[in-house]
Image (cartoon, rainbow, N blue to C red):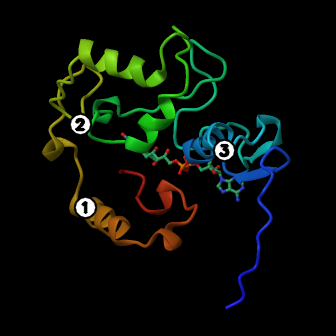
């Protein structure tokens, strides 16, 4: 096999085009800046929606104009999300730039111990009993059908294409 000599990529001159402005796209951009030294101005994130953030709550939080909320903080424990922690360890906290977002999350977790007793609560903050949600046999079948459907089949179909009005 011929051993072709490769010209090393000049990352300072490289442009990176990322499709999708969800956390994966934004993380790819941050890693490219931090680890590959691609200039931030050379990174272009193409997002088809008018709000970035993808499945996160994007764009407009009450506290900051450009911030995104990742829900599910109860699961942000030390044992999980190694890649995310690595990323956050080099991103300064908005509130205290002397510490990283990683440290900020750790401090928060230390202070406010997770104590989750329910996945579903009602408007009065009372734990909802799934058996009393009013789901009938058809709804259960519709849920099973959705669970068993392949991602390609689901595509961009809306929830009302899988469940009836009552659901
Ligand atoms: C209801 C719900 C609850 C969740 N709960 C949790 C949780 O508790 N904990 C947890 O860790 N995770 C949770 N997740 C999962 C987590 O939100 C996702 O795994 C994560 O946000 C996915 O990020 P992503 O960047 O890969 O994709 P996405 O967030 O889907 O972003 C993809 C982006 O690409 C854009 N895009 C797609 N195609 C194109 C195109 N052709 N051109 C331009 N733009 C395009 C989309 O508009 C979108 O903005 C939850 C997800 C949902 C939906």
Check disc 1 and report the residue beneath it.
140
Tell me whether the residue at label 3 lies in contact with that at label 2, contact meaning CB atoms closer than 8 angstroms. no
Which residue is more in the foreground, 17 or 166? 17
Label 2 CB-ligand 1 distance < 8 A: no
In terms of secondary structure, where does tag 3 sit? helix
- Please identify the quadrant where the N terminus is shown: bottom right
Residue at image coords 48%, 20%: 100
Left or right, 110 with respect to 82, comes to left
In terms of secondary structure, where does tag 1 sit? helix
Residue 160: x and y in percent read 48, 56
Tell me whether the residue at label 3 lies in contact with that at label 1, contact meaning CB atoms closer than 8 angstroms. no
Check disc 3 and report the residue beneath it.
32
Q: Marks 3 and 1, Cα distance to the nearest angstrom? A: 45 Å
Q: Marks 1 and 2, Cα distance to the nearest angstrom? A: 18 Å
Check disc 2 and report the residue beneath it.
119
Label 1 CB-ligand 1 distance < 8 A: no
- Up/down of 167 relative to 85, above or below: below
Residue 56: x and y in percent read 52, 37
Q: Residues within 10 Å of mark 1 (few under 14, many from 20)?
A: few
In terms of secondary structure, where does tag 2 sit? loop
Farthest residue in the bottom direction?
A: 1
Residue at image coords 34%, 71%: 148
Mark positioned earlier in the residue sequence (3 or 2)? 3
- Up/down of 2 relative to 29, above or below: below
Residue at image coords 78%, 45%: 44
Residue 154: x and y in percent read 50, 67
Q: Residues within 10 Å of mark 2 (few under 14, many from 20)?
A: few
């Amino acid at each position: 096999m011929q051993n072709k000599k490769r010209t090393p990529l000049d990352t300072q001159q490289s442009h990176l085009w990322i499709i999708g402005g969800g956390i994966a796209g934004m993380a790819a951009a941050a890693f490219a800046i931090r680890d590959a030294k691609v200039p931030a101005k050379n990174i272009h994130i193409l997002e088809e929606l008018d709000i970035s953030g993808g499945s996160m709550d994007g764009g407009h939080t009450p506290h900051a104009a450009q911030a995104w909320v990742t829900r599910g903080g109860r699961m942000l424990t030390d044992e999980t999300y190694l890649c995310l922690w690595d990323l956050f360890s080099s991103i300064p906290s908005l509130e205290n730039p002397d510490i990283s977002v990683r440290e900020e999350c750790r401090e928060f977790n230390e202070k406010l111990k997770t104590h989750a007793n329910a996945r579903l609560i009602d408007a009065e903050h009372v734990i909802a009993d799934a058996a009393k949600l009013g789901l009938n046999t058809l709804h259960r079948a519709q849920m099973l059908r959705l669970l068993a459907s392949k991602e390609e089949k689901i595509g961009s179909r809306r929830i009302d294409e899988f469940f009836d009005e009552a659901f």
